Amino acid sequence: MRLKTLSTAAAVAATAALVLTGCAADSSSAEPAAAASDVIRVGALTPGNANDGAFNQALADALARLADEGLIEYELREQMADPATSEPVIADFASQGFDLIVGHGIELGDAIFSVAEDFPDVDFTASGGVDILEKGTDNVETWTYDATQVGYLSGYIAGLTGAAVVGRVESMELDFVKVTDEFFQLGVAAANPAATLLPVVYAGSFDDAEAAASATKGLIDQGADLVYTTGDGIAAGVGAAAAEAGVLSVGVSPAAGEAALATNVSTVDLDMYPILKAWIDEVRDGGFGGDGVVSTLANGGLTYKKINDVEGRVPSDVTAKVDELIAGISDGSITIP
């Protein structure tokens, strides 16, 4: 197995990361403009809803873009977290002759590998933690993202705001969440060593917005003037509670709504287009199989939302400092501790 270098990247860094679960997409299809012989048929599955503004929507957006470019036609199935539900869908895609089947989410990995054994002439992708990078087969490529970079960049942005007391509302106490949080703390410390970090609070779910809102209010009562979350459904609760209190946030997705975004400084996002485009090219050219790829800042798989100055409360030089950090990480001149 080898790590893939994307055409859009200077390098792919295979650092410890685990893929976030989340919400997936509405079923969609698009008619390609290219010649039929060049069009790749893609079947995709996500564990929740594609309008989550975060993990799952990153795939849905990439699929739609590639369809608009005439490179693929696709079918996207949502709410596929349960293997008992997803495995028959994956097998059905394979039986219908789809060229590529994408399992987007850690919940789909076992089902993808199980079905792939029965369809050696069909190409598949599976996502998971850093360990999945070593599990690629002749017809399965694997993917994860760099949780250290997500956490560090998010923390750096939070620190640059000058917030004195920073709270964190996370989903569940899982390895990849703990990795993200650890590097978030390092990022805050690098940008603002004087900031106080309150103990992390776990909502106990990826999607329980009410629990997340309650946790956010508790942190605000302890003096937090910025609250961070890693996204998914809990971001709506964090964003709403923070905005209501006039407190800054980092990590809230657009799906939370305009009111919740009013005080959200920025969010580190996935961009699945570079990775998905590379897979499509490999399937078309006959070079698919065995690789693992990591979404990073260098290859464009990780990005950040435009800095919101929150009516002048956020320093005007934050964007420049964030871009400088990203450039340094990408060219290797800056190493995350």
Image (cartoon, helix red, strand yellow):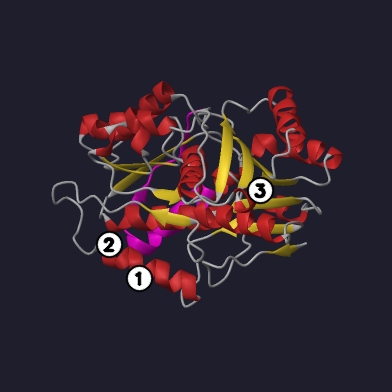
Compare residues 8 and 1 and report the one nearer the observer. 8
**Does residue 127 belong to the magenta stretch?**
no
Residue 120 visible in rendering: yes
Residue count near mark 2 (Cα–Cα under 10 Å), binned few <14, some 14–19, many ≥20:
some
Is residue 152 left or right of 111 when viewed as pictured? left
Looking at marks 1 and 2 on the same chain, the residue that comes earlier in the sequence is marked by 2
Residue in the image at 57% along x and 41% along y:
73
Identity of the amino acid at label 2? Thr
Task: Please give the range of residues in magenta.
Answer: 180-203
Q: Which quadrant holds the N terminus?
A: bottom right
Disc 2 target residue: 319
Disc 3 target residue: 129
Disc 1 target residue: 324
Compare residues 287 and 284 and report the one nearer the observer. 284
Residue 221 visible in rendering: no
Total labels drawn: 3
Please provide percent x and percent y for residue 192: 32, 60
Looking at marks 3 and 1 on the same chain, the residue that comes earlier in the sequence is marked by 3
